[in-house]
């Protein structure tokens, strides 16, 4: 049979490809229907992956400022105990006891109302030390933050939105102004730049008045530390430092329970949740894609049924079973590729509009494009395999007999 | 391919049986058919409806396979060929002309004619060039880009003949090629097919109901009750 072998394999491949494209073009509405299914499925995968990724990024963003090496301790009065909590923390002694800790700040909180320039606003007074500035990464564009030598002076650093609320048009709050807090006048020595609230630390920096912790005695008769925040120099020492931090604080606050939170654990948990959420959305997109695949299979099976006579004619003039199979497979691959490309564009556009509409920052999930196109191609080819094999297994005489 | 006595004939069929399944029961169509056709012969196959003449043509054309018996085509033992080899033989050796033309409606006349060459592995450009020459040889040089729907019955059959001829086959199998044509177009198509048989020595095997057409061929085979007989006196036999 050597004399019967065909010429160039490359020519046959090109021929099958061109033939398939022509068939797709000539099938018109059916091609559009199949394209639509793949396109929507792929767009769903790409859009949901991007929306999931952006939603995860957005939820993580709020926690990112906390840093992955901080530890937050809270004090709770033990049942039956009446001992007051500590009014301050010896940060130098604490750092000596727990060398892994680089910065530590006690936090004593008090809610109050401030009346200034005819305006009254709710504010949170935070008695703390200068190290909170490093822990929270506060920026002070105007003035300065509290320092270790401020001691019990009547200085205050004002949060950004509180400073805005306390100012008037044409007369904003300035460094050097004096704010009345619980009957005492505190001099504004700095105004903090706006910063997103850290959900783990019980301090909303934008709405807070930071005063030296020693000054809290002017505001509360028996000030007690509510919590303490520490920054560990090396994240690998986080667990050990947290344990030592807890032990130290438990000794420093008899009669109180100390609970230590490691935000990294929270971040890890959030990251896991975000990944799960993304997977869930990708799964939903995958279901949409499967529906698209079922659509392709339907359309291709209809196409095979309607083109039985054509298949018979092609076989009669020399097409082999594999030529017929390849013709349908190439058709489905071409269809799926075009649908996937369109789906990627639509998916990215939809996710972009959704993310912008939600007020988030858009970032393209790098995995979304290969996953979207890849899964669409896989689903398309798998969906097209059965119709292609059905077509290839037709006997020429049966196919030709079909009316 | 092993050489044998069968290589003397282009078509050598021996004791071929074929059945159809009807409601799960085998219905014998061909019952031990034997025949030989030489290269360059023209041969009509006659018979009443359902007699099995088209089935015989399909077996000769490798579109169908006999249940039993042997069939040699151009020295190839067809029973031993794979589907792929049979497709290759159809492509290289045989040209089909059907009663209802069987052109692909979505392709224009030129691409319909070029299709067998593309399955042979020729480039689209070369296939179209050869298809164009063949279209011109059957008098349709001015209808290259017409779709089948835009052509008359006679023109469609000419396109079908051009498609059968484009691969320069040794055997043309025609199943009632004039059945859907008016008498003028029918005679036109017959002249074309007989001319090919005469001038190019292409073997022509044609299934027909029409005695006047059958008489124009050198041999007439009559299929009756699953058997084939050589018919010398057409009118008397039918």
Image (spheres, coloured by chain):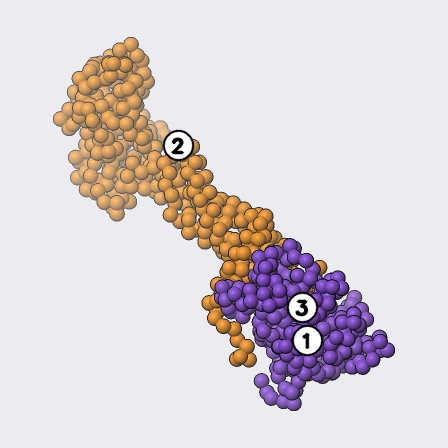
Q: Residue at x 24, y 33 (%)?
A: A137
As rendered, which of B218 and A216 lies closer to the eye?
Answer: B218
Ranked by sequence position, the earlier of labels 1 and 3 is: 3
Drawn side of residue A400 relative to residue A38, left or right: right
Question: Cβ–Cβ below 8 Å for labels 3 and 2?
Answer: no
Q: Which chain is orange?
A: A
Label 2 packing within 10 angstroms: few (<14), some (14-19), many (20+): few
Q: Is residue A387 positioned above or below B69 on the image?
A: above
Q: Position of residue B182 (x, y in %)?
A: 75, 62
Tell me the tag on residue B152: none
The residue pinned by badge 3 equals B97
As rendered, which of B82 and B46 lies closer to the eye?
Answer: B46
The residue pinned by badge 2 equals A359
Drawn side of residue B170 relative to residue A125, left or right: right
Q: Colour of chain B?
A: purple
The residue furthest left is A149
Question: Cβ–Cβ below 8 Å for labels 1 and 3?
Answer: no
Label 1 packing within 10 angstroms: few (<14), some (14-19), many (20+): many
Q: Residue at x 54, y 46 (%)?
A: A36
Label 1 lies in what chain?
B
Q: Nearer the viewer, mark 2 or mark 1?
A: 1
Label 2 lies in what chain?
A
Q: Residue at x 65, y 82 (%)?
A: B39
Q: Residue at x 48, y 53 (%)?
A: A337
Q: Is residue A360 positioned above or below A388 on the image?
A: above
The residue pinned by badge 1 equals B204
């Amino acid at each position: 049979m050597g004399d019967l072998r065909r010429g160039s394999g490359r020519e046959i491949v090109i021929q099958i490809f061109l033939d398939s494209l022509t068939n797709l073009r000539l099938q018109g509405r059916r091609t559009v229907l199949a394209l639509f299914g793949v396109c929507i499925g792929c767009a769903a995968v790409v859009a949901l992956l991007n929306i999931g990724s952006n939603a995860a990024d957005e939820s993580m963003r709020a926690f990112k400022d906390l840093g992955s090496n901080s530890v937050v301790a809270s004090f709770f009065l033990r049942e039956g105990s009446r001992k007051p909590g500590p009014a301050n923390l010896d940060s130098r002694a604490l750092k000596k006891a727990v060398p892994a800790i680089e910065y530590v700040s006690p936090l004593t909180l008090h809610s109050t109302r401030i009346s200034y320039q005819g305006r009254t606003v709710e504010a949170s007074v935070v008695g703390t030390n200068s190290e909170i500035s490093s822990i929270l990464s506060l920026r002070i564009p105007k003035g300065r933050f509290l320092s270790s030598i401020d001691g019990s002076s009547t200085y205050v650093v004002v949060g950004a939105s509180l400073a805005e609320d306390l100012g008037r048009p044409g007369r904003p709050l300035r460094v050097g102004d004096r704010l009345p807090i619980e009957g005492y006048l505190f001099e504004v020595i700095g105004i903090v730049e706006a910063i997103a609230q850290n959900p783990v630390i019980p301090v909303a920096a934008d709405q807070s008045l930071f005063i030296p912790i020693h000054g809290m005695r002017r505001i509360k008769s028996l000030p007690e530390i509510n919590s303490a925040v520490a920054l560990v120099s090396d994240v690998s020492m986080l667990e050990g430092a947290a344990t030592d931090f807890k032990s130290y604080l438990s000794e420093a606050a008899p009669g109180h329970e100390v609970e230590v939170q490691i935000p990294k654990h929270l971040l890890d948990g959030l990251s896991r949740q975000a990944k799960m959420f993304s997977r869930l959305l990708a799964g939903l997109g995958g279901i949409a894609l499967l529906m698209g695949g079922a659509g392709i299979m339907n359309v291709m099976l209809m196409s095979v049924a309607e083109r039985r006579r054509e298949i018979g004619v092609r076989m009669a003039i020399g097409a082999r079973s594999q030529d017929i199979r390849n013709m349908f497979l190439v058709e489905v691959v071409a269809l799926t590729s075009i649908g996937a490309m369109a789906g990627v564009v639509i998916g990215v556009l939809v996710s972009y509009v959704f993310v912008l509409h939600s007020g988030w920052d858009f970032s393209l999930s790098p995995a979304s494009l290969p996953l979207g196109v890849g899964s669409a191609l896989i689903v398309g080819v798998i969906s097209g395999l059965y119709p292609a094999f059905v077509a290839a297994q037709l006997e020429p005489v049966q196919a030709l007999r079909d009316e | 391919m092993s050489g044998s006595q069968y290589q003397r004939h282009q078509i050598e069929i021996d004791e071929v049986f074929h059945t159809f399944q009807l409601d799960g029961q085998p219905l014998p169509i061909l019952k031990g058919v034997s025949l030989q056709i030489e290269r360059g012969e023209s041969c009509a196959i006659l018979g009443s409806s359902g007699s099995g003449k088209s089935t015989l043509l399909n077996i000769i054309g490798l579109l169908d396979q006999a249940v039993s018996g042997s069939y040699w085509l151009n020295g190839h033992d067809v029973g031993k060929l794979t589907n792929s080899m049979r497709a290759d033989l159809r492509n290289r050796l045989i040209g089909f002309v059907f009663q209802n033309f069987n052109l692909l409606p979505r392709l224009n006349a030129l691409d319909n004619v070029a299709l067998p060459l593309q399955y042979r592995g020729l480039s689209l450009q070369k296939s179209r060039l050869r298809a164009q020459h063949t279209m011109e040889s059957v008098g349709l040089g001015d209808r290259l880009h017409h779709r089948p729907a835009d052509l008359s019955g006679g023109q469609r059959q000419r396109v079908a003949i051009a498609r059968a001829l484009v691969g320069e086959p040794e055997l043309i199998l025609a199943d009632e090629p004039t059945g859907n044509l008016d008498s003028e177009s029918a005679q036109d198509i017959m002249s074309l097919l007989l001319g090919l048989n005469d001038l190019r020595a292409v073997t022509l095997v044609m299934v027909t109901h029409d005695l006047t057409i059958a008489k124009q061929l050198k041999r007439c085979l009559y299929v009756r009750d699953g058997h084939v007989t050589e018919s010398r006196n057409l009118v008397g036999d039918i």
